[in-house]
Image (tube, rainbow, N blue to C red):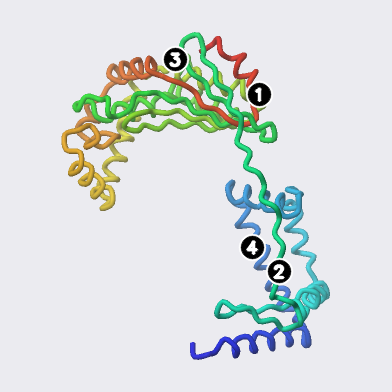
């Protein structure tokens, strides 16, 4: 505060000149080296962060494996290496200070002409293959041969709006129970099956539709489709699992009702929609969820599967592989 843009620019240029003149100290380099190594460890500690690091290396260097040697490279950083890089980067003719929307240069660079831009890349939309199974199931598939992953979504035209008021939350409970035992396998066996595939499975329920989603590598497509078929066609709905998942759902509702934002949303939909199904929470209320049992869940699942309109898929699985898997559905 109280410093002009010109004064700030002058101070920055003096700092750069001091860096180039006096150089860095060994302690400064050691501190920077340790901070960089610690940051790298934090970045690689989670799956998402690790994926970002590999993607960053792939985009900027064209070599995702560059990350693997980063820790060793940081350890080998030297004072001489930093000094050489600093003298190259902080060339006076390359320094630019931006202030007040104007460009000020420390050298003789011509900033009156804008840089040339590349031509806009054409937008290439994926080609969708549309076909229908003998049982009426519609499939919409887009291929991307460069991506060894499949993203699949099964959409069912049955959501919370179709529930009877006294069965509020049964669609949500049904979706959560699909993977908790199916095709003669227990909940633990289903979890082990999914883990072995390295796939992700999810179920979501809205007011008008429900959907099941899967993400998996192309080379496990057959096994993943078998898994999806099992949860869709042969869910067990064992009373023990219904009781457990129902209690988990009740605990979740209780936690949500402690959140002011959730309470505000519930009041808003009731005010807007009144007695319409949209005026009820899609996941049900404590008194309705507590009354749900295996029989109600099984009936809702039967009705929902009868109204299943189609599957959407995209990724690297060949269309012929999906076409080959029509018969089990």
Residue position for label 4: 38
Write down the residue under mark 1: 318
User: Answer yes or no: do the residues labelled 1 and 2 have beta carbons within 8 Å?
Assistant: no
The x and y percentages for residue 54 are: 68, 49
Nearer the viewer's eye, disc 1 or disc 2? Answer: 1
Distance between mark 2 and mark 3 Cα atoms: 56 Å
Q: Quadrant of residue 290?
A: top left
Please, what secondary structure does the residue beneath circle 4 have? helix
Compared with 52, 153 (above or below) is above
SS under mark 1: loop
Q: Look at mark 2 in the image and give the residue it sits on.
A: 33
Q: Quadrant of residue 223?
A: top right
Mark earlier in primary sequence (4, 2): 2
Foreground tag (1 vs 4): 1
45 relative to 89, above or below: above
Whole-percent x, y for residue 235 in the image: 42, 18
Q: Quadrant of residue 287?
A: top left
Earlier-in-chain disc, 1 versus 2: 2
Spot the residue most to the front. 113
Real-space Cα separation, disc 4 to disc 3, in angstroms: 49 Å
Residue 16 seen in this snapshot: yes
Which residue is denoted by mark 3 in the rendering? 234
* As drawn, 62 above or below 300: below
Q: Which residue is at 38% across, 14% downward? A: 306
Please state if 118 lies on the left or on the right of 141 as rendered.
right
- Mark 1 and mark 4 lie on one chain; the one further toward the N terminus is 4
């Amino acid at each position: 505060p109280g410093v002009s843009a010109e004064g700030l620019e002058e101070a920055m240029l003096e700092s750069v000149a001091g860096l180039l003149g006096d150089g860095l100290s060994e302690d400064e380099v050691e501190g920077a080296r340790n901070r960089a190594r610690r940051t790298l460890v934090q970045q690689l500690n989670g799956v998402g962060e690790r994926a970002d690091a590999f993607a960053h290396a792939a985009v900027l260097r064209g070599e995702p494996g560059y990350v693997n040697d980063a820790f060793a490279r940081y350890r080998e950083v030297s004072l001489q290496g930093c000094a050489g890089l600093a003298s190259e980067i902080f060339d006076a003719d390359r320094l630019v200070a931006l202030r007040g929307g104007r460009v000020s240069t420390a050298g003789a660079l011509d900033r009156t002409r804008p840089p040339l831009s590349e031509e806009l890349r054409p937008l290439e939309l994926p080609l969708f293959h549309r076909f229908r199974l003998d049982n009426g199931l519609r499939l919409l598939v887009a291929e991307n041969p460069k991506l060894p992953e499949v993203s699949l979504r099964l959409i069912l035209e049955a959501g919370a709006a179709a529930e009877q008021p006294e069965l509020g939350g049964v669609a949500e409970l049904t979706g959560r129970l699909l993977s908790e035992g199916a095709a003669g396998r227990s909940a633990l066996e289903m979890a082990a099956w999914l883990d072995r595939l390295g796939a992700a499975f999810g179920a979501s329920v809205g007011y008008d539709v429900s959907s099941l989603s899967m993400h998996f590598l192309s080379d496990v497509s057959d096994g993943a489709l078998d898994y999806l078929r099992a949860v869709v066609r042969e869910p067990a709905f064992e009373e023990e699992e219904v009781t457990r998942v129902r209690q988990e759902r009740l605990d979740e509702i209780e936690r949500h009702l402690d959140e002011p934002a959730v309470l505000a949303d519930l009041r808003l939909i009731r005010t807007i929609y009144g007695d319409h199904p949209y005026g009820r929470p899609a996941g049900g209320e404590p008194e309705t969820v507590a009354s749900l049992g295996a029989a109600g869940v099984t009936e809702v699942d039967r009705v929902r599967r009868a109204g299943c309109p189609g599957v959407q898929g995209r990724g690297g699985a060949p269309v012929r592989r999906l076409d080959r898997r029509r018969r089990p559905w």
